[in-house]
Amino acid sequence: MYPELKLFIAGEWRTTRRDMAVVNPATEQELGRLPCAEQSDLDDALDAAERGFRLWSRTSPRDRSDTILRAAALMRERQEEIARSITLEHGKPLTQARMEVIRGAEFFEWDAGEAMRTYGRVIPAAQGHKFTVHHQPIGVVAAFSPWNFPMSQPARKIAGALASGCSIILKAAEETPAGAVHIARAFADAGLPAGVLNLVFGDPAEISSHLIPQEPVRLVAFTGSTPVGRHLTTLASQHMTSVLMELGGHAPVIVCEDTDVRAAATSGAIRKMRNAGQVCTSPTRFFVNDAIFETFTETFVTRAAKTVVGNGMDTGIEMGPLANDRRIPALTALVEDARSKGAIVATGGARHGDTGYFFQPTVLVNVPDDARIMQEEPFGPIAVINSVTSLDDAITQANSVPYGLAGYAFTNQADYIDRMIDEVEVGNLSINTLEASMPETPFGGVKSSGYGREGGSEGLDNYMTIKNVWHSSNIV
Ligand code: NAD
């Protein structure tokens, strides 16, 4: 059920001398061994990607699009096999893993369409002159994808690169490699030319510090934490290499007094626990108008406490384990810090069971501003519920973090919504839904949440560069 794990370089699968264990976070048992790239593998990947770029950038947009669509169709066909390996390595419930496979295929399908719409423009000019603007693929992309969505995170990066005519070297997450391996297999089977997509694993710092300074690499695309994003941006800037950074978030949810309070609370409790809270858009800081605070909190806590936690392979599970053991002490410390400063731990707050990396669905209420969790993204199943006196108060609280990725609100008041569109500092604002992105909508952050957008008609911009052409009919 779990695939054999290999690097994919220059169209060939390869193993290496060094390897590491991939562990099932629900059982702590080893699933397989993952080869780690040596410098010579990275150099081979760079050579292959350079050759791949020369070929793929000259391939017609329609042919590129067709290849991507063939690979996406194979991913849909293989949905069950891919979903099972995602649940094994990541822990999420199988139903969520199945949805992730389809979302990954949709990312490819959307960008395959966009490949044929990277329009330039004509600028009016004097008689005998033509000004034209051309969008051209930027070059080799070095991409780094995280472990929270083993299939859809690599899909975003590979789709953007391939649709734009770039080649890519992807270092996918070592804890959850199978999603990316399945994608590479689908592209190999769909007839993607060798070298256009290269997949490596290993020591993240070793790989990024080797790849980013290389001349053919013209874009660094990263999804992960803000500190690592900052480090990679610094490295890229020394070589004038562009970056696309999808970093952390700490999403506020503004709950206004006019909303259907029980429906909003239930939706919040369910959505917060999705993917065990390991989502950069996870709704975390709930700012609830004090007129409805009590009912909201009671409904939310009751539903959160009922979350069915267990091995994602079992039927009826709503929340699996955390994807790795690093987050258990990190989350415990955040809860203890908040408790010591006066927050109420209304449910959860500790590890769940003693096998597997499970954490209890946790709700903290009346959390003081100086608690670390008010500034630090928990990236786990912890919600904060605080009361606010007005929309002004809620917007001030929402904007009081360095992050600005997703933000949410529950209200039907048009004037409130207009104010939030103008004033909430996020890249993605959703009203009366806790979904933040679709393949056809641009996704990305402001402030310390990063630069650039993935998806939407903006999604290929970072992967392309602009060439202006001035054609004069006569020598002047
Ligand atoms: P981390 O900062 O150690 O790693 C985050 C990701 O970056 C991992 O995939 C890791 O392999 C990669 N990475 C780390 N150092 C790197 C380097 N020098 N070069 C290239 N890649 C490197 O943190 P973690 O413990 O794995 O994850 C926890 C934090 O990461 C969370 O608090 C969250 O903020 C963030 N995160 C965000 C997302 C997202 O979707 N934005 C996804 C996963 C993790």
Image (cartoon, rainbow, N blue to C red):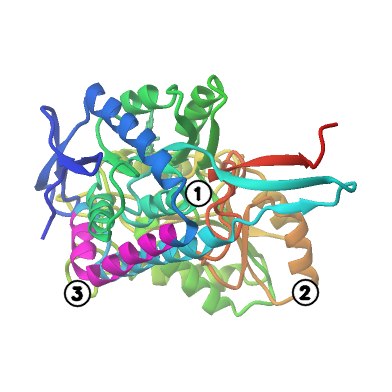
Horizontal placement of 401 versus 60: left or right?
right
Q: SS class of the residue under badge 1?
A: loop
Question: Is residue 185 shown to the viewer in this render?
Answer: yes
Is label 3 within 8 A of ligand 1 (CB to nearest ligand atom)? no
Horizontal placement of 463 versus 15: left or right?
right
In the picture, the quarter occupied by the C terminus is top right
- Sequence-earlier tag: 3 or 1: 3
Report crowding for label 1: few under 14, some 14 to 19, many 20 or more residues within 10 A (C-alpha): many
The residue under the point 42% across, 57% down is: 64
| Amino acid tagged 3 | Thr
- Sequence-earlier tag: 2 or 3: 3
Q: Which residues are magenta?
A: 63-88
Depth check, mark 3 against mark 1: the one in front is 3
- Please name the residue that numbered disc 1 is placed on: 343
Report crowding for label 2: few under 14, some 14 to 19, many 20 or more residues within 10 A (C-alpha): few
- Please name the residue that numbered disc 2 is placed on: 414
Picture quarter with ligand 1: top left
